[in-house]
Image (cartoon, coloured by chain):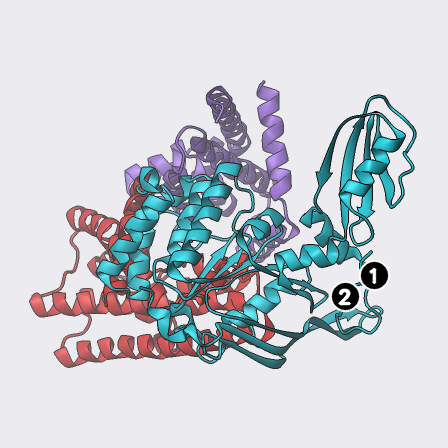
Amino acid sequence: MGLTWQVARRSFRRWSTYRAATVAGVVTNTVFGYLRAYVLVAVAVAGGGTVGGWDEPTLVTFSFMTQALLTGTGAFGETELAERVRSGDVVVDLYRPIDLQAWWLASWTGRAGFAFLARGIPPALVGAVAFDLVMPTGPVMWLAFVVSVTLASGVGFALRFLTNLSAFWLLDNRGIDQLVTMTLLFFSGMLVPIVLFPGWLEAMARALPFAAMIQLPTEVFMGRYDTVGEVAGVLAVQAAWVAALLAAGRLVLAAATRKVVVQGG
Amino acid sequence: MPSQASSQNRPVIVCDSLDRTFTVRHRAGLLRRRRVDVAAVAGVSFTVQAGEMVGYLGPNGAGKSTTIKMITGILTPTGGRVETLGLEPIRRRTELTRRLGVVFGQRTQLWWDLPLADSFELLHHVYRTDRRRHDANVATFVELLNLGPFMATPVRQLSLGQRMRGELTAALLHDPALVVLDEPTIGLDVVSKHAVRDFLVELNRDRGTTVLLTTHDLDDVERLCQRMMIIDHGRVIHDGSVDGFKATYGTHRRVVVDLAEPAAPLTVPGASVEKVDGPRQWLSFDRRETTAAAVVAGVVAVAAVHDLSIEEPDIEELVHQVYTAPRDPAGDGDRSGTVP
Amino acid sequence: MAEAGLAALVQLSASEFALRRLGRAIPGLATLVVALAAADISWTADRILLVPVTVLSGTVIFGSVWVATASISFWVVGAREVANSFTYGGGFAHQYPLQVYARWVRTLLGWIVPMAFVAYVPAVHLLDAPNPLGLPAWLALAPPFVALATATVARIVWGAGIRAYQSTGS
C-alpha cells in the first residue's frame, strides 16, 4: 500500500525534526527510570527482598523498560484527530477517498517507530549499563519481545483513536482524554507494576487492554513466561485487543461519519 | 483529453426540490427547550451541465454551504433528490470524491509541515492517479501558477496567495470532472487574484472542467462565470446568465457629470439626481424609459458641463439590492420585476 | 523593568487560574488530614505550626521551581521539555523518602532543586522518623527560608528571561 508507507515515512520524518524535545524527553525518561527503580528497590528491601514475587533486578528492569516503551506505545496519548474535528478541518479528510483509521494508523506507525528508536533505546541502554537488567534469553525471546512491543503500540493506537473520535460528540473531549490517560497509567503498570496489586485487582488489570500496552511486553522482555506456549498466549491476548479495539474504532468511525452527514455536526 | 468525455451528455449536478431542515433547540423558559425546525435549504432545483462555470451567490446563512455539502455528499438532504456526476452523493461518497475537487478559501487541504511538493506527492498516492499523468499535471500547474520558487517551502511558511495557488493545484491533480470552489480569492492580493482567475478560465476552456464557485467577490463572478445563481433564505431567487441578471435588475444606469461650477441638483426629464458632491452630480435613469443620450442632452441644456461619464450598473450594487429587497409574499421565489 | 516582568507573571498566572485547578488540591489536602490523624504523632507547639508552614513553603518552592524552569523557553524555543526532569521528576521523587535514592538523585532533586524541603524534611521532624541521612534537627526550620530563596532565584531567572525576550523582540 503505497499510501500507507508514504504517510508513515513522512510521520517518522516529521517527528524526527523535534530534536530538542526528543533529547529532553530521553533525559526525563531515563531519570524516571532511575527514580522508579530506587523506589521499587526500597519497597523490595522493606519486603524482604522481593515484592509480588519479583526480585530487585526484575523491578529495576521493569522501571527502565517501561520508561523505554512509554512514548512508542502512546501512553500519553495524542489529540491531533480530535483537534481536526474541533476545528472542522476533518471535513477536508471526508472529501478524500481515504480510510481515516488506516491513515491515522499509518501516521502513528511512523511516529511510534521514531519513538521506539530515539526515546526507547537510550533509556534501556542506560539502565543496562548502570544496573544488571534481566534480559531476553535467546533470539526467540527477543523476537517475541519485538512482536509484543509492536502489538502493544497497536493497542495504544486503537485506544487513542477511539478517544479522539469522541470529539465528534463532545467537542471538548479533554476530559475523556485525561480520564483514559489516568486509567491507563494506573492499569498498565506504569505507576506500580500490577503484580503489586491485590490479587483481584491484578486479575482485573490483566483483563483490561491497558496492561497489554506496558506490563505484558515488559514481562515478555524479562522472561516472566517460561514456555513458548505461555509467550504465544500473551501475544495472542495482545493481538486480540488490537483486533477488538480496531473493530470498535471502525464502528465508531462509521457512526461519527453518519452523524456528520445526517445531522450536519 | 479529459477522461470525462463519456459524461458530456449527462448533467454534472442535478438538484431536484432539495430540502434541508435543521432542528435547533431554543431555550423556552428556565429549563425547557423548544425545538425549532429551521429550513436552511427549501426546494432548491437546478441543473449544471458539463463545462459550465457557475457562480453561486447569497448572503451569509442563505444556504450556500448547505447546498454545496449536499451536492458533495457531506450532508444528507431531508427532502428532494441530488445527483452529482451521475452518483448519489451520500451513498457513493468515496467514489464521488475521486472525481471531485474542492478548494476551501478558509481551510487548507495541504499538509502544514510538509513542503508543497510533498503535499502533491501524497495526493498522488491518495487518489492513486497515473504516475505520468500526475507528473504532467504537476508540471503544468507549476508553470501556469508559477509555483516553482516555493515548491520546497513548508506550507505553513507560504503567503496566502502562494498557498491558494497550491490549493488549486492540489484540488486538480487528479483530473476531477467537477471542481467546487468556496471563496477561493478571499484575502488575496490583486496579482494573485488575477492569476487564479486566469487559471480557472483556462482550466474550464482547455479541460472542460465544470466549476461551481461560491463567492462574495462579484468581480470573480463577472470575470469568470457565464451563469450565476443567487440563493437567499434557502431558496434560489435567481438563476441565469450574468448579462441577463444585469439586464433584469440593472434597469438603471448612471450619468456622472462634472459641472463647470457647483449647482443645485439639476432637473432633467427622465433622470433623478442621486448624489451631489461639489460640481459633480450623479444622475440615475431607467434605461427602459429613456436613453443616455437623451439624459446627456437634458443635462447640457440646463448647465455648463465640464466632463461626464456613463456608468453601467455595478453588479455588486445589484446583488445587494436583490439581497435586501422585500420578500415576494407568494414565497415562490419569483423575484423578476419586483426590484426597483 | 523588573516590575513589568513580575506583573506579566502575575497576569499570566491569573489568566490561567481556573476553579477546577483548586479541585486538584482537595484530594491532597484530604490525604494530609487523614495521614496526620492516622499517624502516631506527639503533637507539640512547633509541630502544630509546622503543618501550615510546610504546606505554604512547599507551595512556594514548587511554584518557584516551575517558574524558573519554564523560563528556559525565553532562551530556547521548544525546550520546555528540558525542564520536565526537574519539575515532574522532582514532583515524583519528593513523594518518597529521600534515602531510597542514590546520592546524585538526592543532591539534584532533593537539595539543589530543594524538593526535600517540601515533604521529606518536615515529615522526618513531624513523625520523629528514623533519620538515616543524619539531617540536623534545625533543618526542620529551614523550609520557609528555602522557599524565600527559591522564590528569589525564580524571580531573577524570570526577570532575566523577560529581558532576553524583550531584547530579541520576537
Chain in red, by letter, is: A
Q: Chain of mark 1?
A: B
Using the image as rendered, state which of residue B33 and residue B89 is in the foreground. Answer: B89
Distance from Cα at disc 1 to Cα at disc 2: 10 Å
Q: Chain of mark 2?
A: B
Q: Secondary structure at mark 1?
A: loop
Q: Colour of chain C?
A: purple
Using the image as rendered, state which of residue C55 and residue A103 is in the foreground. Answer: A103
Q: Colour of chain B?
A: cyan
Using the image as rendered, state which of residue B199 and residue C91 is in the foreground. Answer: B199
Image coordinates for residue A128, horizontal then vertical, percent: 17, 51
Question: What is the number of the mark on residue B326?
Answer: 1
Label 1 vs 2, first from the N-terminus: 1
Quarter of the image where the C terminus of chain A is located = bottom right
Q: Which residue is mark 2?
A: B335
Q: Secondary structure at mark 2?
A: loop
- The local crowd at label 1, few if under 14, some if 14 to 19, many if 20 or more residues have their Cα within 10 Å, is few
Above or below residue A153? Residue A203 is: below
Image coordinates for residue A153, horizontal then vertical, percent: 30, 65
